[in-house]
Image: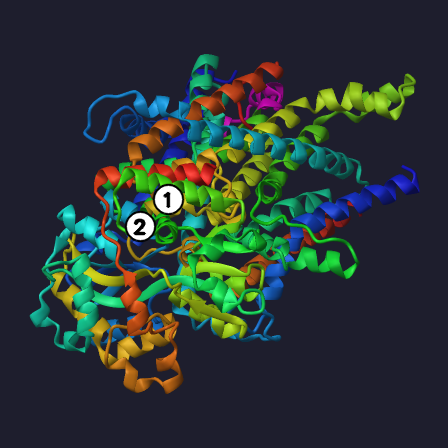
Amino acid sequence: MTNVKKGASYLYLGLVFLFLYAPILVLIVLSFNDSMSRTVWGGFTLKWYMNLTSNDNIMGALGTTIRITLSSSILATILGTSAAIGIHYMKKRHAAIMLGATNIPLLNADIVTGISLMLLFTRFTPLGEFSVVLAHIAFSVPYVIFNVLPRLQSLSEACYEAAMDLGATPMYAFYKVVWPEIFPGVLSGFLMALTMSLDDFTITYFTKGAGVNTLSTMLYTQLRKGIQSELYALSTILFLLAFILLLVMNFKKDVRKEAKTK
Amino acid sequence: MKKKFMSLLSVLVFGITPILSFTGCGSDADATDTLVVLNYGKYIEADVLKRFQKETGIKVKYEEYESVEDMYAKYKAGSINYDVICTSDYMIETLRQEGELIPVDYNSLPNYKNINPDIIEASAAFDPSHKYTVPYFYGTVGILYNTNMVDEDTVSSWDCLWNPEYKNRIVMINSQRDAFMVAQKKLGYDINTTDKLELENTYKLLCDEKKYVYAYLQDETYECMISEDAAMAVCYSGEAAMGMEYNDDLDYIVPNEGGNLWIDSWFVPRTCKHYDAAMKWIDFMCEEKAATENFEYVWYATPNTKVAQHEDEKTLADETVFPTKETLGRCKLYEAYDKETLDYTTTLWKKLKAY
Amino acid sequence: MINRFRTSFLAAPYAVWVLICTILPLFYILGYALTNDAGGFTLSNLFAITDAVHLKSLWLSIEVAFVTTIICLIIAYPVALILHNLKISNKGFVVFLFILPMWMNFMLRILAWQIILSNNGILNSILSAIGLPTVHILYTKTAVTLGMVYDFLPYMILPIYNALSKINDQVVEAAADLGANWWTTFIKITVPLSKDGIISGIIMVFVPALSSFVVSNLLGGGKVLLIGNVIEQEFTLARNWNLGSGLSIILMIFVLLSMSIMNKVDESENGGMLV
């Protein structure tokens, strides 16, 4: 690659990153703004961060969000991964039916999914945190399936069969041969489920029980009269945590790689 | 073959589920010492809510909604049994006509005497025999404007919203009833008209306005005014007061043609499972200290007569917060539409948005 | 040999799940769509799409979704290509940087765009500071499209990047060895081989863009009425669940149609899949 081309491509990447991160920068700046209005700069303050832990509402919503997000994405990953394996080995016609049904939550407008699930849940279970977990599983399972399936498709069956021929039990062969291949798909499916669940508002709003608040639903009801600045602070912290986690994971990988090459 | 793996997975999936359901709430929905409250977003001081739970020992499940329509959808879905709800006048009337309300036992509300009789009287528009409601806050719909960009004469009539000079600097209210009210006042109609021709004309007038409108907003109109993105905005009085706190150039007026007076009130819906607790809640909202704290947080006009002694003269003289008798004389409450008119106006509103 | 029949039962729990949590709710919606508020059978909720207002908003949605998809594709393909050619060890990290923004709440991010784009917003302040004329973007169709591009861009980048990384580099090298210049290689080899990724990306952007309503609520200023907004308002403001359901069934059919068209383009054997 010539230097000019390299420079241009870095510049291009930089611009795209600027586009993606500009709003985030704005929100981070807002979290230090000493004013209840988001259009007025009232000076630098750390008070929203200080107040954060003493704000029961926000802390409660954070706890609920974490519980819902984690449990729904873990369950969705388990359910979705086993489903993907099953579908992969199904007769083609059956697989097509399953995939068609899997597409439905992705095709529906969120509000339709939300209301239809609410109609379902109210018949069988009282709405609460649990119903939100079910709803989140419902809309995130497809992401897991569609992340795992391509991995399975590019998998060569010969390896698995070879392992079996050499005397491995099916479980062992699966764990040693199939699992490492599909794992990146499972992981990205899990991450997507996690992200979707964290970000969802509409479906949560309709399927939650009384007094259950996630960060998203809390934000929505505050749109009308101004968002509590503590929420900017909390979002900044969450974002930075994810960022640092990413850095650390990446760093660890590098260390491991270096150790290997040595 | 892979059976083991499969059964392991199914155990995991179906095993974790019941465990989770334990941690989720739902089982305690019918406990006697809880109360399910539904209110507008950010419409209560957090400490008042805390104090209520501490003093009465009642655990409150506090739900918020953003717009009246959200509330209606959530309530009608019947997914949650609400015990006590706060919402706006004409929606209460709709619910009353649908037989969704339970009478309030005023004898069990010692603090009810704090409520301004004038406002109770005005409530007759949606609660004629005065059996179902207790006022919480009230206010008007008017124009919040920037004195550097518009002079008072201009905004003293709703006509200013059709002035090409302010193209893209007018914020219209994003609520069907309020937007129609503005055009109806300009046309000299009654704000509760159900005449199809009049409604059609209202719609046409609003279509004319659309090309000048910067945005139809209901949420945070005041932010748009503080930053001076717009010159004038149709909004609720409380929102105007909020904006004026941050930008000294802003002022609020209810134009000469008059406007709308709205009253948000507490009522008990048919789904109520904890009636006594609901009464305690409503009474607590009428209590002097709670009402004062709520007022200082929400910044709408309070019907509670005891609050005045805690506020300074400047606040009490603030005509944005407390509309004068003269202003109130020009304002009228909405009446609920019958089903046919409701459907018709909703269609017109949709057509306007798509126009 | 893998016992395909037995292994396929791994999907059994999911099949049950789909029946209860996907198919059953769909029947609820269908039930509403095919009845009027008195409970009698009617098809009028489905035919309501021919209403001038509904047709107009459907058309607007298609237009916005289409433009969004095209812009996303134009921005995303070079990004994916550059990422693919990047000669650094921690490529995964760079890829993750595209998903990371999603960890900031969606509504907050769109709200931030309001601050950036408003009349006296950040963008206009910058423009006027460097002596350029200011722009009126917020609360227009442009703002809605921009918001959607912002929101859906990662969904376009990731599948294309994945498809590119599956390409055997030797094929590309072979083309170069045989005398093809960069452009020819790109058009004849790289693009066709990444077709699956492009199609997944297009579907992943187009479908949600078609039914989205939050972005247009926040950045459209109530002036941009998409079909998603109409459906949402039928469920809330208009309190007409029957009509809302009818329109969403129509929207679903529409999405299915556009997907089958996309899959016609994509002749790969696994047609019918989304990602």
Q: Which mark is residue A113?
A: none
Q: Amino acid at mark 1?
A: Thr
Residue drawn at point x = 50 percent, y = 18 percent: C2
Name the secondary structure under disc 2: loop
**Vertical order, C8 against A44 (above or below):** above
**Disc 1 marks which residue?**
B202
**Disc 2 marks which residue?**
B189
Residue C169 image-quadrant placement: top right
Looking at the picture, how far across and down is residue B281, in whole percent? 20, 68
Left or right: A174 as drawn, with respect to B337: right
Between B341 and B104, the one lying in front of the other is B341
Residue drawn at point x = 30 percent, y = 28 percent: C24
Quadrant housing the C terminus of chain C: top right
Looking at the picture, how far across and down is residue B6, in whole percent? 41, 30
Q: Chain of mark 2?
A: B
Q: Chain of mark 1?
A: B
The type of colouring in the image is rainbow
**Vertical order, C60 against A70 (above or below):** above
Looking at the picture, how far across and down is residue C54, in whole percent? 43, 29
